Image: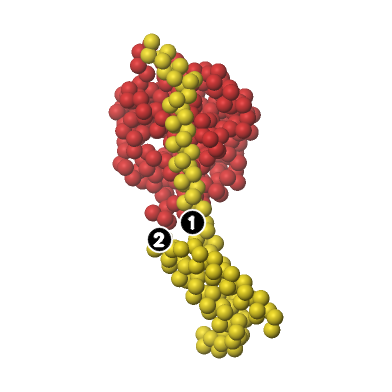
Amino acid sequence: MGQKTVAFIIPVFNEQAVIVKTVEKIPEKFLTVCVNDGSRDDTEIELKRTRALVVNHPINIGQGAALQTGIDYALQFPEIGYFVTFDADGQHSIEDALGMLDTIKKTKVDIVVGSRFLGKAHNISLSKKLLLKLAIKFTNYFSDVTLTDTHNGLRVFNRKFAENINIEMPGMAHASEIIDKMGRGKWKYVEVPVTIKYDDYSKSKGQSMLNSINILVDVVLSRTRR
Amino acid sequence: MIIRIILIIFIAIILLWLIGQGASTRGQAWSKLIGFTTLLVGIIAIIFPPITTRLAHLVGVGRGADLLLYCLTVLFMATTITQYMHRKDNQQKTIQLARHLAILEANRNQHNLNLLESNKR
């Protein structure tokens, strides 16, 4: 097998039911890194059955921190040129990720982000849609970038961006944080349509609406501290 | 009044505890200084209650007890905020520690080593 040049980073928290399936969808030619964020179910055991490299957080510290750990771990391999962040619950499609990899190689941008509002979002509830639109307005207002979807977990970026990303928000506020960094660093980015599948499983695992208040407070506080 | 003795004993205990801490950094030294002053003012207020009333009149508050309540409120808010900041700071440290530990462990974990070995072949 040749050297792997792309790493999939998957933060995993309590996903024993689907994690094996999600990893199996990822072609073998890619390096897959699963960061188990202190899951309380059998995720750790399930992960050992996969061909994903596993990094176990000793305690649960949040998705943002898990992403950063995965990136740091993958950066140890000098042959990795591209990083893909992928959700563990199976709501992202591998075809979209492959398409985004093509895009980043062809267009030579630093980051390609997926947007469910350019593409199709199946089965999304109206309240979730409204909340996301609000989050988008908010994030676009505060950062220097303009995107149609600011809270999508599917991203592809190059090594240079990976080396500079340094996510400080441990929880869910990292999505806004990454976009903020994209704007500050004057990174080149492009947004492409992706399809998100909202099935019952991913819906039950998804962010509760109330948590958006936590995220909002986190983001505002971090800005005032700077 | 018995309450005066009880209060002074309590403050003395806190004072002794503060002295026992030993200042190591500038920040700690400042918070200790503020702590000492607060406690001393407290003792004076306990022994000579009219002083608080006079102070209160000076700043336009009716009673000494009211002034004390206002001071307490401000102090409480300040404490809450500093505690919150300390907590955030500690959280960041815990996160760094956990992430570091996780990567160290991942680099020696047999499952990963086997996979990386088979990738090379």
Helix, strand or loop at mark 2: loop
Disc 1 and disc 2: Cα gap in Å? 18 Å
Point 60% across, 43% down: residue: A209
The colour with which the image depicts chain B is: yellow
Label total for image: 2
Residue at label 1?
B85
Q: Quadrant of residue B13?
A: bottom right
Q: Quadrant of the N terminus of chain B?
A: bottom right
Q: Does A15 appear above or below A148?
A: above
In this rendering, position of residue A206 left or right of residue A1: right
Q: Position of residue A133 (x, y in %)?
A: 51, 42
Q: Colour of chain A?
A: red
Marked residue chain, label 1: B
**Label at residue B25:** 2
Q: Amino acid at mark 2?
A: Thr
Q: Chain of mark 2?
A: B
Give the colouring mode of the picture. by chain
At label 1, the amino acid type is Met
**Residue lying at the far right of the rendered structure:** B2
**Where is residue A75, by image quadrant?**
top left
Q: Is residue B98 visible?
A: yes
Q: Residues within 10 Å of mark 2 (few under 14, many from 20)?
A: few
| Neighbours of disc 1 within 10 Å: few (<14), some (14-19), many (20+) | few
**Are the numbered discs 1 and 2 placed on the same chain, yes or no?**
yes
Q: Considering the image in quadrants, where does the C terminus of chain B appear?
A: top left
Residue appearing at x 52%, y 47% in the figure: A215
